[in-house]
Image: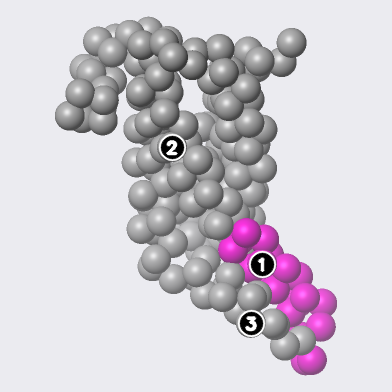
Amino acid sequence: MFTNIHPLLVHFPIAFLGLYAVTEIARFKFLTRQPYWFYVRATLVIAGAAMVWPTIIAGGLMEEQFKGTSLQKVIDVHSSFGAFTGLLFSIIGAAYILEWYRLMKSSANANGYRPSVLVRIGSWLVNSKLIILLALIGLVTITITGALGASMVYGPNSDPFVKIIYQAFIHG
């Protein structure tokens, strides 16, 4: 009954995580100085990471319909990139949750709050340059995942970009 829900769900994490990655990579001073900017990025990545797992599960259910067909290799590579993308953005999302927690605790109890090691690691990641690299890697992997998905739906020659990705990962 719910085996075909993957195409319905997939666009939400793509939109949220893609937009998050762009906001993380393109750091315009007039935005990054705004006190709300952290919360914009945090909301995008946390919502996207939360939505990616039901999408991956739905994709796995849908995958069963195509076992042994000519699409099997594309599905396997698409699935692997999707899982890596989900894991990467979940780590980033967890770091943002920890930093959000730290910000709430430190503003509520400015004098006595001492963050745990885990909270400090999350805070470090969110505030380091590494987060930009992770966002860029995530943007690349979500793009490859999407292109391989498009190759299954519309064909490997549906557009020049999909054709390049398909050739590189399926017939490379």
Quick check: can you spot residue 141? yes
* Residue type, label 1: Leu
Q: Main secondary structure of the magenta part?
A: helix
Quarter of the image that includes the N terminus: top right
Q: Position of residue 170 (x, y in %)?
A: 26, 25
Q: Nearer the viewer, mark 2 or mark 1?
A: 2
Residue corresponding to mark 1:
98
Q: Which mark is residue 86?
A: none
Q: Work out whether mark 1 precedes mark 3 in sequence or the reverse, and give the earlier one.
A: 1
- C-alpha separation, residue under disc 3 versus residue under disc 2: 31 Å
Q: Which mark is residue 80?
A: 2
* Residue type, label 2: Ser
Q: Which mark is residue 117?
A: 3
- Callout 1 secondary element: helix
Quarter of the image that includes the C terminus: top left
- Callout 3 secondary element: helix
Label 1 crowding class (10 Å Cα cut-off): few <14, some 14-19, many 20+? Answer: many
* Residue most extreme to the front: 68
Residue 100 on the magenta span: yes
- C-alpha separation, residue under disc 2 versus residue under disc 1: 27 Å
Image quarter of residue 148: top left
* Residue type, label 3: Val
Q: Work out whether mark 2 precedes mark 1 in sequence or the reverse, and give the earlier one.
A: 2
| Rendered position, 34 above or below 16 | below
Residue located 49% across and 13% down the image: 66
Image quarter of residue 169: top left
Residue 157 on the magenta span: no
* Residue most extreme to the right: 108
